[in-house]
Amino acid sequence: MRRDLDIISDLVNPGARVLDLGCGEGQLLAHLQANKNVNGYGLEIDADNITTCLSRGVNVIEQDLDQGLHNFPDDSFDMVVMTETLQTVRAPDRLLDEMLRIADQCVVTFPNFGHWRCRTYLLSRGMMPVADHLPHAWYDTPNIHLCTFLDFERLCRQKALTIIDRFVVDDRHISRPLANRFPNVFGHTAFYRLGRAGSAA
């Protein structure tokens, strides 16, 4: 399994009810079902990915995240997961509210647009960065809300959301001392486990 999905798996309790937003080919849910006995569902919009999910025995619903999660009642799940998708939705702040309405906790991962390579690229070339973790040109990128770790944590403070855990990794999803010391400059990707406003860490 991909290293980033392995990190997320460690954050999910055995037997949990899990919703995976933008679940792709269902690799995470298939792993959680087989190894942690979770009751999982995925939301996905790509038809090919949905077919792959079904072939893996993953429960999947065709749904556009920009339409919200109104079809799920409060406290439907123990954990909602959203990997590398936050920056692609139209209203990430409202989607976070929805995630923590239907679950006690959520896990969110996203790339850091404050990484030193992005800063250097923009400063030296005067153009929007193109890199391994940001492979698209400015005109065809799915990323519509570019943010840094500091931006995200500021949003969490504004909403009084509890940051239970944060893991900062490099482009190989390995934790490095420099990235942990200066995450907003040297961190490539962050994994945040969040709780509802006012919840205990």
Image (tube, grey):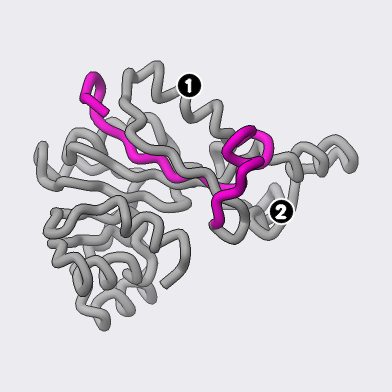
Left/right of residue 9 with respect to residue 58 in the rendered view: right
Provide residue 115's location: percent of width, then percent of height: 68, 40
Hey, which quadrant is residue 31 in on the image? bottom left
Instruction: Classify mark 1: helix, strand or loop.
Output: helix
Q: In which quadrant will I find the C terminus?
A: top left
Residue corresponding to mark 1: 154
Can residue 95 be seen by looking at this rendering?
Answer: no
Provide residue 193's location: percent of width, then percent of height: 34, 40
Write the start and end of the magenta stretch as one range: 174-201
Residue corresponding to mark 2: 137
Residue 98 highlighted magenta (yes or no): no
Neighbour class for label 2 at 10 Å: few (<14), some, many (≥20)?
few
Foreground mark, 1 or 2?
Answer: 1
User: Residue 140 shows which numbered tag?
Assistant: none
Tell me the kind of residue under disc 2. Ala
Left/right of residue 146 with respect to residue 70 in the rendered view: right
Neighbour class for label 1 at 10 Å: few (<14), some, many (≥20)?
few
What residue is rendered at 18% in x and 40% in y? 103
Q: Please name whichever residue, 53 or 64, is drawn nearer the observer in this view of the structure.
A: 53
Residue 177 highlighted magenta (yes or no): yes
Which residue is situated farthest in the front direction here? 177
What residue is rendered at 68% in x and 50% in y? 139
Hey, which quadrant is residue 67 in on the image? top left
Provide residue 43's location: percent of width, then percent of height: 28, 58
Query: Relative to 161, does residue 132 appear above or below in the rendering?
Result: below
